[in-house]
Image (cartoon, grey):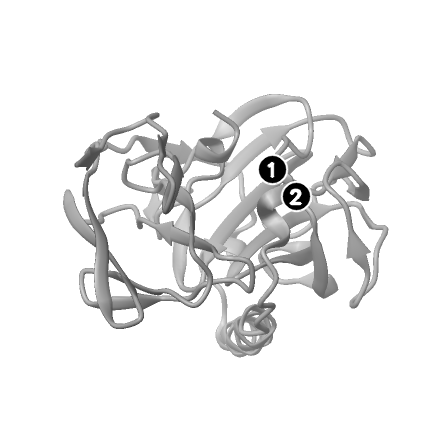
Amino acid sequence: MILMSYKIISAKELKLEGQAIQGGLIVGWTRPDSKIFLDERKIKQGLKGDFLVGFGPDAKIQSNLKIFYKEKLVTEHQFNLVKRNYKIQKINGLPRRKVMPNAYDLKRIKDERALVKIARKKYIPDALFVAGFSLPVEGIVTGVYGSRRILNGVPRRPHYGLDIAAKTGTPVTVISDGVVVFTNEDMFFNGKMLIINHGLGLTSMYIHLSKIMVKIGDRVLKGQKVGLVGSTGRSTGPHLHLGVMLNKTPIDPEQLFK
């Protein structure tokens, strides 16, 4: 059986829902204590049978999902992903140091990335994301996932998030149930930011805030206010950058809301 984009498969022993597309996230369920593999890579399963499959921006078009129960192969599915073409986005007017950091800045950036990496490693075995997903803020989309960015005329890393422009002080809400695992008031690139863990390796990151309204360890519910829109860090105007990761794989946030 082939899982195409926007299709939901539901059977007695397996349920799959999501976007079979580069950058997409599949939310799945099968019998607890199953062994799940995607192209020989083991997928972690929650206590109640939930699991997640994520596809990076350049994921190969075809992948195979295999599920074993009591060492027996019980079902197998093939994902045929929709291939994407990514935009080029040019942004000018950024301070020179935010595009060409000096030696001191580079050391600071390296240290900050290490802190974020540690926070994202925290594993929660509960599938808190089953609460579903909702947009964190209403506004105008100004940056999309996968775009190849040219900053002040200099090519930089692709943009693996969703930028939504809104007025400074606009409430920002969490996209799903989770636990706050990281906050920082002054990141070099990200400004005021926070990270929320939704279980099974899924995290969401809220960047450029003007105010953080939660603390590490807080349990938050979908739609709960966690901060305010701002323009801190590397930013040319007030907006929210929403980033979503499944372990080390960047996920397109927009796919969660379709």
189 left or right of 186? left
Q: Secondary structure at mark 2?
A: loop
**Are circles 2 and 1 on residues that touch, CB within 8 Å?**
yes
Residue 2's disc is none
Name the residue nearer the viewer: 244 or 150. Answer: 244
Residue sitting at 17 percent across and 51 percent down? 64
Name the residue nearer the viewer: 114 or 220. Answer: 220
Of discs 2 and 1, which sits in the foreground?
1
Q: Position of residue 192 (x, y in %)?
A: 72, 55
Q: Quadrant of the N terminus?
A: top left
Q: Is residue 27 above or below residue 3?
A: below
232 left or right of 101? right
Residue labelled with disc 1: 132
Q: Position of residue 180 (x, y in %)?
A: 73, 61
Q: Name the residue type under label 2.
A: Ser
Number of numbered labels in the structure image: 2
Cα separation, mark 2 vs mark 1, equals 6 Å
Residue sitting at 38 percent across and 41 percent down? 12
Residue 176's disc is 2
Quarter occupied by residue 87: top left
Q: Position of residue 178 (x, y in %)?
A: 69, 54
Residue sitting at 74 percent across and 40 percent down? 230
Q: Nearer the N terminus, badge 2 or badge 1? A: 1
Q: Is residue 142 above or below residue 36?
A: above
Q: Is residue 235 visible?
A: no
